[in-house]
Image (spheres, coloured by chain):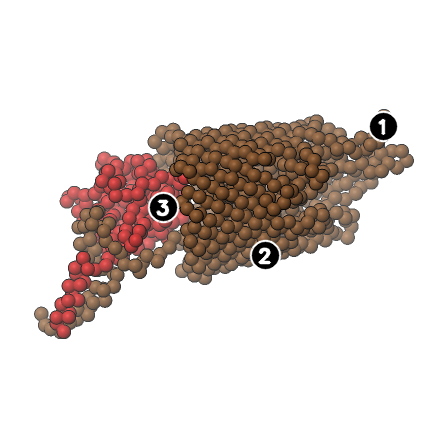
Chain colours: A brown, B red
Amino acid sequence: MSRRLLLFFCLLLQPTGVSANVSADDSASLTDYSLEQLMDLSVAVTSAARKPQKLEDAAAAIYVITQEDIRRSGMTSLPELLRMAPGMQVAHIDGSTWAISSRGFNAKNSDNLLVMLDGRVLHTPTFTGVYWDAQDVVLEDIERIEVIRGPGGALWGANAVSGVINIITKSASATQGGLVSGGGGNFERQGTVRYGGKINETGNFRIYARNIAQDNFRLASGADAHDQRDLRSAGFRADWGLAGGNSLTVQGDTYASDSDHTGSAISLSPPSSTPIGYTIDQKGGNLLTRWKRALSTTSEWTAQFYYDYYERRYLNVDERRDTYDLDFQHRFLWGDAHDIVWGAGYRQTGDRMDNTIVVAFDPARRDDRVAGAFFQDEIALNRDKDLHLIVGSKFEHNDYTGFEHQPNVRLRWKLDEQRTVWTALSRAVHTPSRTDADGLVTTTLLPATGGIANVMQLQGNPAVQSEHVRAFEAGYRIHPSTRAQMDVSAFYNAHRNLMTIEPADPYLVAGAQPYRIMPRIFYNKASATTYGLEWSGNWQPSDKWQFKAAYTWLQMNIRRDADSLDTSIESEVGRSPQNQFQLHVFHSPSAHVDLSGALYYVDSLPSLNVPAYVRLDARIGWRIRRDLELSLTGRNLLDSRQPEFVNTSGPRTSEVSRSLFGAATWRF
Amino acid sequence: MRLLCGALLLLALTPAHAVPSEYDLKAAFIFQIAKFVEWPAGSAPPRLCVLGGNPFGAALEALRGKPSPSPERKMEVTLLDMGADIRECSMLFIASPAERHLERIVAISRGAGILTIGDTEGFAKRGAMVNFYLENGKVRFEINLDVARQGGLKISSKLLSLARIVDFQQDR
């Protein structure tokens, strides 16, 4: 071999020899190593920098509440958990009612959010909002809660106007073994029993029973607010992972709740209006089955069916509803650039209302159908796949307003591994509820004229149209490391066709004691623009410390049409806080102890005369054994009690009290 | 000059001194791990498929044709496109770009005698059978035994003794 040739070889080998890239020959010799020898070898550090992708590549304002967040919060009910999602407006009205919304229009009967639990829609078509007093789930069994602010109608259909909340429970395979948890405090007691086991090689199940009971809050005067509640539930979930890419889920729940409230009893002779205590009883159940089939690594379909039943009674009002829902979706990659999901669904809901003088529906029974289909294509616009265009729409037919379309266009640009910007244009609709179209609700008694009582009655309007929103959103996400993330989103919403309540000509109702009805009828005679900014950040300087903060700024302008006489619609502006700030601190001084604190600032609600408030919640958790954890949670620690919202449909306002709650969780 | 050159050659070719790249090492791991896994009867020769690009580079090519687990059975190696049929594979390495397809891969490989392997944090909890991770610069692996059993695979106790055993996303 000539000297020159050897030198050439030498030069060729030198860079590969000293760098991390071992040639094929070397790796061939590595295969002769035993497992133990391989485990002794250190790898070149260059590639250790590869980090898992943690953040969702979503072109929407999304926040995920994890099981760890839930555990560390010490909260014991679904609505209270939503408080920690940036941009949400959550206010406890009384023992069993909450006002929950995002991006404005907060109200007791807030109807702009779509809330789902494992694919089952929680809101009732009676008012397109959620009866929060009748919703419960074993919090330890929640895998995550996805909170999406902004319209979600293109995928989810009507009534996802200002957000979508998706509560996802764990697969039964992840909840094996037993769990007993119980706790009590000065306002609340609760207990949960859950057990999970194997059905066979491929199937797992869990069953649970749970009870949550809350004592009366206090009025501003310090008297009992008559708003205690009690909710009992039991249920199961079974999951099978079958050969051939099939997964099957069957789950069901049954529950009974009762909650105390105070209303006004109206009588045609003085005293015309007196506070009256009553109890809302709700019983219900549901059964859901989901079949998922992976056709290939890039294609799958899901078919889901559920049945939901409830009966809700208070005073003489009785509302019964059966809902059947069938949903199918198929997702596949088409070529290299298209990620397509399409689907179709059908929902039938029927109700029977026992009408009373105070609350009635005309007709008293109604069956409604919603049929719809959607498609969405996520298109990679360039070879590097860092620029994505998302287009899609839902097309739906409902029995109230007929055909509705809800398109959206989104653009996501991944600037680099750490930074993503996105923007979206979308349209979403809020279809009329049963109350909007058919309700007859007697609200107040006005001063008598000529010896005849005047009764104000809210009347549904079968001709009422859908409310709709056109939304422009943009967001920026940065995660410089796995320990720090920041998320900013801004939105501008143009709401049209908002419902107003317009007076109509009074008429006399004859009888032994004749009275005059002053109708107030639903029309679409207002519009609004809302805009705002939502910021959230997360910083984990070490394994022992974590900080999360969020700030939300909201502006609303509501204009009623020239011919509208609804003077109350503009006051909606003052029912959602203009500024909200929250700070969460988590600290684990040792492997067995964790501390958490949550500080909330919520701006005043001028229309309701609710002053701005600061709320502090704190929790200490102590894992005394591997299988046993004790915790103590304090809520609303800074104030003995304070109002967070006002029940506009009742004569009294409950205040949220300072409370302590101790709990123990045992797993076996 | 010649002396220096010789020293460099030595450095390059002596494994004890060379620092292997992460993926050369992982390729060797996969080759060894295959010896401790028993596939359902009647399985074809071991066929390693890689989905989501080829992070192994040339190390993957070096595995082709190597005898495993017995001298008469030669290892086959295939780079799969997204959407390809994975049921012909006996081992499937899911590279991190294919992460979002993991749940479907897990579903399809159930009962199909496919050893699913990954190296992305959380993969084993999400249903991959073997998942590599780094600890103090050394390659370690975790095994989701439930999934492996459901997949019709028998994993030797020796392999299990070297692995971290994980379940599906269990609560603590």
Q: Is residue A177 above or below residue A85?
A: above
Q: Name the N-terminal-most of marks 1 and 2.
A: 1
Labels 1 and 2 touching (C-beta < 8 A): no
- Compare residues A95 and B109 and report the one nearer the observer: A95
Q: Amino acid at mark 3?
A: Phe
Confirm whether circles 1 and 2 share one chain.
Answer: yes
Q: How many marks?
A: 3
Q: Amino acid at mark 2?
A: Leu
Label of residue A626 in the image: none
- Compare residues A27 and B41 and report the one nearer the observer: A27
- Compare residues A326 and A34 and report the one nearer the observer: A34
Considering the numbered disc 2 on the image, is that residue within a helix, a strand or a loop?
strand
Q: Amino acid at mark 1?
A: Gln
Q: Position of residue A386 (x, y in %)?
A: 43, 59
Q: Position of residue B113 (x, y in %)?
A: 28, 39
Confirm whether circles 3 and 1 share one chain.
Answer: no
Q: CA distance from mark 3 to mark 2?
A: 35 Å
Confirm whether circles 3 and 2 share one chain.
Answer: no
Hey, which quadrant is residue A444 in on the image? top right
Q: Is residue A481 above or below residue A613?
A: below
Please name the residue that numbered disc 1 is placed on: A513
Q: Which chain contains the residue that carries disc 1?
A: A
Q: Which chain contains the residue that carries disc 3?
A: B
Q: CA distance from mark 1 to mark 2?
A: 55 Å
Camera-side mark, 1 or 2: 2
**What residue is drawn where x is 62% and y is 36%?**
A96
Please name the residue that numbered disc 2 is placed on: A533
**What residue is drawn where x is 73% and y is 42%?**
A522
Please name the residue that numbered disc 3 is placed on: B123
